[in-house]
Image (spheres, helix red, strand yellow):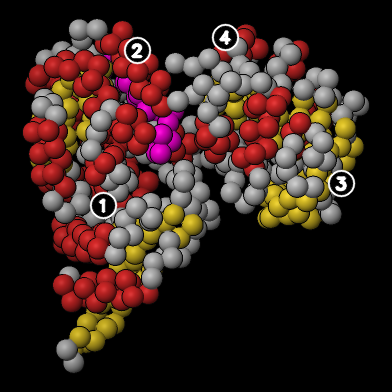
Amino acid sequence: MKNDVVLILDFGGQYNQLIARRTRECNVYSEVVPYNISVDKIKEYNPKGIIFTGGPANISGGSDTLMCDKGLFELGIPVLGICYGMQLITHIFGGKIGRAVTREYGTTNVTINNKSLLFQGIDENTSCLMSHGDFVAEAPENFNVIGKTESCPIAAMENIDKKFYAIQFHPEVNHTKKGTEIIKNFLYNICKCSGDWQMNSFTKDSIEKIKEKVQDKKVLCALSGGVDSSVAAILLNEAIHKNLVCIFVDHGLLRKNEGDEVEKIFKNQYDINLIRVNAKDRFLNRLSGVSEPETKRKIIGEEFIRIFEEEAKKIGAVDFLVQGTIYPDVIESGLGNSAVIKSHHNVGGLPSVVEFKEIIEPLRNLFKDEVRKVGIELGMPEELVYRQPFPGPGLAIRIIGEVTEEKLDILKEADYIFREEIKRANLHREIHQYFAVLTNLKSVGVMGDERTYDYTIALRGVVTTDFMTAEYAKIPYEVLDVISARLVNEVKHINRIVYDITGKPPATIEWE
């Protein structure tokens, strides 16, 4: 599948997956691994380079220092340390770390030495994102300073002979204007990567690996009808055909008409063995009285698995369960060293006992845009591949507070109108995700000379390349006017519309 591999050592930074994403944008395959991975394991990967991520720990504090296997520095492999990674390299090689009086956070002008291979082709003054409390007060012996800011005298350094490089800022985020170029310089100028990572090679290799793993055994696929699970299902169908059984759990929390659309596409267009389970009442009963979002997610995740187990028993022996888990699901569920942002029903919400031999997650290491490329590679229609992202727990996490049938009906209609008008305005490919949220807030209104006391609908639209960071979409006022008028006139129990203008971070894309 890949010749060149770059390892990303995860020290718990919030942007660690973005580093992997930027690396792949440069056509170099990368994997995120624990910070304490052994040298022997690193040798198995035979990486062309190693990148240390940032992280919340600090060197100056002592007790919470996260330490990598120092033997990796003896392997002759180029290393790039980012933020905490820079401080760790400094600590290991005898430099000095200081505690900043004032934490430096935000976009900062960095003066760099563009004669360095790391900064080749970049202007001497460039804008970068800083986020740190500790800083390098004195560079280690044999390291040259190649970058500085007004308040950080050592913002970048290099040991040319050892091919060790370190930067205090974050090249992986959009706020660092030439960040991708810096990563590309490390990959090509320093690591000498060939750039052989392509999605078609991933697709072909995945199909062969699935064939080899599954052979003639039965596979049960958890199909939601969203982009991720749909691509996973078609990928499995290409590999094992009639040994695949897709179970589509219609939990009643889908968007308007979505259940029927999913059934039609997979049964008629792809001739996949699809079992549709109508379980709306079962899910609503389990969710009755539950308001806390993490609890809702875990209930839905557990109920999904229980239904799969029940259906598996009906169809006989099933060895594997397939899920459409992707990289952002994994990181936001807090696996590894990162903090839990929210549990995903196909990651953190799994119950402790699952009655399958093994879970197959063919898309686990891919970002959303990479998943879509696989879909196109598989010949899937664009309207399915570019379908609006939809969380596994469905509308349950777009209803703030308790989920009831009445609230579901309100939100389904509101969300349908919002999406319809966005498409009518030809904005559906410019805005990468857009949806309605039914808040738990009621307010006073007036309609037809009568007082109302009804719900507030929040509209959310974001522009993003990787779904790890996002900016709110600047929807034209005239489009919002039409949407607002339709919502209050066509959907009962709504009398107020608000538009969410928060980015990610500080917010997540979903509200719960």
The answer to whether mark 2 and mark 1 are in CB contact below 8 A is no
Q: How far, Cα to Cα, is label 1 from label 3?
A: 50 Å
Tell me the residue at 62%/51% (across/down).
Answer: 175
Q: How far apart, in angstroms, are the residues tagged by discs 3 and 4?
A: 38 Å
Q: Earlier in the sequence, mark 1 or mark 4?
A: 4
Name of the residue lying farthest toward the front: 121
Q: Quadrant of residue 221?
A: top left
Residue bearing the label numbered 2 = 209
Q: Amino acid at mark 2?
A: Lys
User: Residue shown at 23%/55% (left/top)?
Assistant: 403
Residue 204 part of the magenta-drawn span = no
Of circles 2 and 4, which is in front? Answer: 2
Does residue 349 appear in the picture of this structure? Answer: no
Say which label, 2 or 4, has the lower sequence index: 4
Residue extent of the magenta highlight: 355-370
Residue neighbourhood size for the residue with mark 4, other residues' Cα within 10 Å, grouped as few (<14), some (14–19), many (≥20): few
Residue 395, disc: 1
Residue 450: quadrant of the picture: bottom left
**Label 2: few (<14), some (14–19) or many (≥20) C-alpha neighbours in 10 Å:** some
Which quarter of the figure has residue 95? top right
Q: Position of residue 249 (x, y in %)?
A: 17, 37
The amino acid type found where label 3 is placed reads: Pro
Q: Report how far apart the C-alphas of labels 1 and 4 lie in the structure.
A: 43 Å
The residue that disc 4 covers is: 44
* Mark 2 to mark 4 CA distance (whole Å): 19 Å
The secondary element bearing badge 2 is classed as helix
Residue annotated with mark 3: 153
